[in-house]
Amino acid sequence: MSGSGWKFDVPTSGSKQLPPDPRYVEALSSQGYGFEVAVADLVDNSIDAGARDVVVHFLRDGDRLVSLLVVDDGHGMDEDALDVAMTVGGQRDYAPGALGMFGTGLKSASLSHADAVTVVSKTKRTRAAGRRWLTAHAVDGFRCDIVDPGYSQDLVDRYAGRPITWQGTVVRWDGVKDFPQHGGGGQTDRYLTRVISRLGLHLGLHLHRFLARDDFNITIAVEDVRTGTVYMDYGVVPLDPFGYPASGVTGYPRRWTAPVEGLGEIALTAHIWPPKSNLDEYRAVGPVQERQGFYFYRNDRLVQAGGWNGYRQPDQHLALARVAVDLPPSGGDVLRLTVKKSGVNASPAFAAALESAAYDAEGRGFKAYLDDADQAYRDARKRSGTVRKAVIPPGRGLPPEVRRTVQEELPVLYGEEPIAVRWDRLGSDLFFDVDRENRAIVLNQRYRAALLGGRRGGLNDAPVLKSLLYLLLHKVFESEYAGPREKDNLQLWQAVLLSAARSELDRADDTADGPDGAGAP
């Protein structure tokens, strides 16, 4: 085609309305929101509504979890505002300091985790009103149910005084996909212990600036709807990722500024944590390679906790480096918030500005900060009197907290496939095997039940045994061939562990038979 015929603007001859297919709701509900991220999105809406008190309420009926509610004392919504809030992509005017942006958070966060989401709300001047999305109705022509006014008022009254006073909103999830299908045998209690701990840490971290205020609270509670018994009721505490008692390096935190094309000057407040901190504010953020880097805030909400956003790769020696960045009102194409508000996409212009144009008050480039953080880590290692050799990290089969501790205590060979630990069928003369090709330590399934002592097995079971074997065997994977000394050690460990496992199996059989050999009653 001749270049002279090219049209720089595409000509049009009119327009037509093309409403979304109802199946769009299925796509909306499959955006991959994590449970904690989804709940945090609902709490964001409460903050935007001026709430001072937010309750995340798990409701159970005996052993079965039935619903999850997020209740607030914000300014509420009348019926027109409620319709906009429940419209997919509904547009409303966000205040300058609002955390919401796209008009999809409530629906996509809720429907990605629940079969039904009900929103009931009232203002000081209007009666309680409610709307409900059922996934089945949403995909059948975007049909949104109108909640019975009497029930709407009853639900508001249920939370009268805590937290709702004259106004507020209740978001109710039913058919929550993350809840245990069968709650017996302590499953519900174990689930609640695990998920509430994670949720408290997530909310405490990402909303720590709000929680540090005297006039804002988040409570997580569990109640039995049949008996009214309250099993748990505690306030979320702020988890400030910069909440160290004293800086790891004198003179920090320090402020760098970087002029970024299209955004103006971006301020970066650089911190260096004290080495070997055991504070939750340091350890609970995540694995060591993920917690270093940039902490982006938007209107005081932490939207990204760690990561270098293309500026550089994570490094064990930068484990103490954290940089606070408050995003400008509009990041343009340079710093774009993800739809789920759980990360920031940075263009190459941001990394380029840090590399060549970021300076502190003394005219030092941003690399000087990285050098200081690196040196602080190395000095701490020297003072401990040991220099530990880098290792291949552990992988599947060990709990995340164990993997995290290994990576905190030992330098990691980045780019290497982690070492998995798993159970499989092996010959009776083996307790373990080393699978170099698939980079796995394999344990003999024959001894699993005896070693677990009757406990239920799972992907991350027997963490003590697996951790010890990882510490014994990780060096085997770091060399291509086993030398005579290594082979002798493998034979020694195999013999001792096999004998111990057989003894464990015999003890389990004796317990099953009872003291008189006739079988336990």
Image: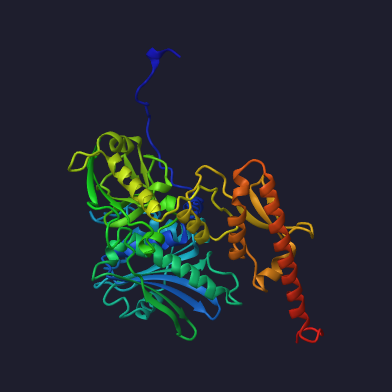
What is the image's colouring?
Answer: rainbow
**Quadrant assignment for the N terminus:** top left
Q: Quadrant of residue 429?
A: bottom right
Q: Residue at x 76, y 79 (%)?
A: 510
Give the percent coordinates (x, y) of residue 44.
33, 61
**Quadrant assignment for the C terminus:** bottom right
Pick whichever, 244 or 32, lies toward us.
244
On screen, residue 483 above or below 152: above
Q: Residue at x 50, y 44 (%)?
A: 414
Give the percent coordinates (x, y) of residue 199.
42, 66
Determine if residue 87 is in view.
Answer: no
Left or right, 53 with reference to 177: left
On screen, residue 55 above or below 351: below
Going by the picture, which residue comes out furthest to the right?
518
Q: Residue at x 59, y 44 (%)?
A: 478
Left or right, 249 with reference to 221: left
Q: Residue at x 37, y 64 (%)?
A: 279
Pick whichever, 96 or 87, lies toward us.
96
Left or right, 250 with reference to 4: left
Determine if residue 240 is in view.
Answer: yes
On screen, residue 500 above or below 507: above
Q: Quadrant of residue 369?
A: top left
Counting labels gives 0
